Amino acid sequence: MPESERRIVKMKNQKKFCIKLMASFLFILVYIAILVWINQPLPGEVPTAASQIKFARAHVTELIRDEGKTEDWTEGLRIGVQEVYLQIDSGEDRGKILPAVNYMSGYNNVDLKAGTKVIVRMDMDASGRSYIASIPNYNRGPALLGLTVIFLLFLAVLGGKKGIAAMLGLAFAMVDIWFLLIPMIRHGINPILSSIVIAAVTTAVSLILLNGLSRKTLCATIGCVGGVAMAGAAAALTAAATPINGFNMPEAEELVLRTGGTSLNISGLLISAILIAALGAVMDVAMTITSAVFEVHQLNPELNRQKLIRSGINIGRDAMGTMANTLILAFAGSALNMLILFRIFDYPYLQIFNSDMMALEIIQGISGSIGIVMTVPLVSFLSAFMCTRTNAADMPVKGKQRKNRKKY
């Protein structure tokens, strides 16, 4: 290539890089501004009682009295009363050693020994002195943090740059849900619309981090959003026909009590939950099929659009089954205790099938699976259209190289 052409190509690449950099910077600024705005307190909102409760980390320094014993039904768990001394390890009372009474039951069981690390609820008496009101939980933070670190290390070591990009995408998804989706719903924005917006933004950012700005990323993003929207549509139609909505979900009563008189749309939370639950599996299928179609086109550029679509659908058939199983089994696993109770009480199948809980699980599992199934042809068509419309910039193939490629 002549020197002049090299300079032109270099200048074009630098221009593209600057545009991408400016676009990324602008997106980050707008995103941060939206986060700050949407997380402002609601009009007239006052601090809740729960937000005023003080919790602290602590560990047992001495076990004074232990009346715990096992029962036949507790499967080795001890129930009873313990008296202990605890040293506070965080908060305003850090370093203090305070007495506490620990009540153990089969359902709230924190069995203390010397050195046990726990979370304590702090309170103040009439004279303003701190005391330990209860011991609700073990301090599980170190174990959970350790598990998370191990996962991230595996992801980074085995996945390399892609693994690190996946970490960033996962972190972005968590920020989206906690700091964007939930505040949007609390501000009265339609939960279904909010979830679709979050699904689109999360998918786009996650795939851009993995593959950069490319035609492949565009196809996968559009296909993923389309699949999630189809899952939501299937759920909405079924919910309207059943009828069932967010008020039939387990936490609905608590939400009504805590948010009565606000603009929170509880009925739409069912579809919102389905959209978010299906997003990960649909994104996986969309990216898999897109990469496969682009790879097939790269290996054999002479294949026409119809053959590329057929290849994408054939490749997607295996993913349909495995991902559909993943969603349905995940929902079944979350309802395992209730399913066991149904068998224990020998409920008639007519009632089991028509109960709120079973209807919710069926709608969630099958709607998400419909989203996966419909994503395959949608992404196959988009990818094939993009490949045959023009030679994708993601995968340049020179004419001399094409002659040596195996035909499929």
Image: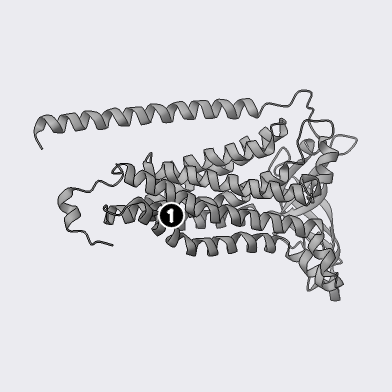
Residue 127: x and y in percent read 89, 34
Name the kind of residue labelled 1 in the image: Ile
Q: In this view, does 127 lie to the left or right of 302?
A: right
Q: Quadrant of the N terminus?
A: top left
Q: Which of 347 and 83 is in front in this view?
A: 347
Q: Which of 355 and 4 is in front in this view?
A: 355
Q: Give the residue displayed 48% in from the left and 49% down from the top.
A: 378
| SS state under label 1 | helix
Q: In this view, does 213 lie to the left or right of 53?
A: left
Is residue 97 placed above or below 373 in the rendered structure? above
Residue 263: x and y in percent read 77, 30
Q: Give the residue displayed 67% in from the left and 47% down from the top.
A: 273
Whether residue 315 can be seen here:
yes
Residue 359: x and y in percent read 76, 57
Q: Give the residue displayed 26% in from the left and 30% down from the top.
A: 14
Q: Is residue 197 left or right of residue 284?
A: right
Q: Mark 1 points at which residue?
A: 289
Q: In which quarter of the image is the C terminus?
A: bottom left
Is residue 391 placed above or below 354 in the rendered structure? above
